[in-house]
Image: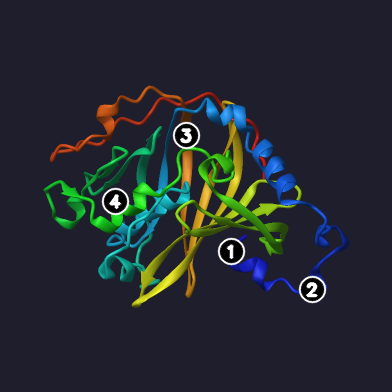
Amino acid sequence: MSLLAGACLTQALAAADTKAPAVGVSVAQIVEKHVAARGGLKAWRTVQTLSMSGKLDAGTPDSIERSAKIARQGMGASVKAAPAAAAQGGTDKTAQQVQLPFRLEMKRPRKSRLEIDFAGKTAVQVYDGQQGWKLRPYLNRDDVEPFTAEEAKSEETKGDLEPALVDYAAKGTQVALEGVEQVDGHNAYKLKLTLKNGDVQHIWIDAQSFLDLKVEGQPRRMDGKMRTVWISQRDFRAVQGVMVPYLCETANAGNPRTHRMMIESVTVNRSLEDARFSKPQVLVAASPTPAAPAAAAPAKK
């Protein structure tokens, strides 16, 4: 069900079992149940690396820059502002849709490497915890470019591997309950997170499963205005004791089109050398597809 579906539901369709939960629940109780639903604090503290691969719903062929944002934002990482040309790439509804293979690797503390394959070339974005670089051959740019000041600042403030509410107090985050809203037909607690740097983010926690159904991402500039971004998370599966969403769908305010990140494999604590997160070489070959991990537990929605 799309992000817009919840907004289209009327009160007449609300059955007794979808009645809003009692207001008496505390923020501490919601967070505690959410962390447990995601695998628990102990399990997440053992996660040192997270590797995944899959497909990105890129829209049209000139939307590759946007696809990088979908991958990084879909897992709760920071994203970068898109050039106007990339933002306009998906406006032709008759254009052929494109799905791009991607690989995302993350390692503590705050290291990340994203690769996206397109037309026989591989785009790369790397952050080593302090500096970042990008290689964008699909724009006919063969040089490794450093992150802009804005991109670097965004990376400095992003979260690490675990969900935002895991060990939130130690991160200096404050959490408040703003009410209950419908998300894709589910009652969800709307939580307001005030990060240590003062930034504000909202997360919607399913009132029954206590999984995070929707996450507010960093705003994007579209048509000269900053637009709110939401990421819906579905198809949660257990991977080595932690719950990971295998489908992330990103939507922008004012744009009915959504973009999906479809994860095909996830590996926890795969050995990743620090060199993977250093400045990339100019010629980058597509990385081999990681070996298939152990079968995930049955899907939990």
Closer to viewer: mark 2 or mark 3: 2
Q: Position of residue 264 (x, y in %)?
A: 47, 38
Where residue 73 appears, as percent x and y from the top left, is 43, 52
For label 3, count other residues whose C-alpha is less than 10 Å away and answer few (under 14), some (14-19) or many (20+): many
Spatial distance from mark 3 to mark 4, Cα to Cα?
A: 28 Å
Nearer-N-terminus badge (3/4)? 4
Instruction: Quarter of the image for the C terminus: give it.
Output: top right
| Amino acid on which the number 2 mark rests in the picture | Gln
Q: Quadrant of the N terminus?
A: bottom right
Left or right: residue 52 compared with residue 297: left
Question: Going by the image, does 257 lie left or right of 240?
Answer: left
Considering only order in the chain, which callout, 4 or 1, is on the residue closer to the N terminus? 1
Residue denoted by label 2: 11
| Residue 148, horizontal then vertical, whole percent | 23, 56
Question: Which residue matches tag 3?
Answer: 265
Q: Quarter of the image holding residue 6? A: bottom right
For mark 4, what is the residue? 152
For the question of whether residue 40 can be seen, the reply is yes
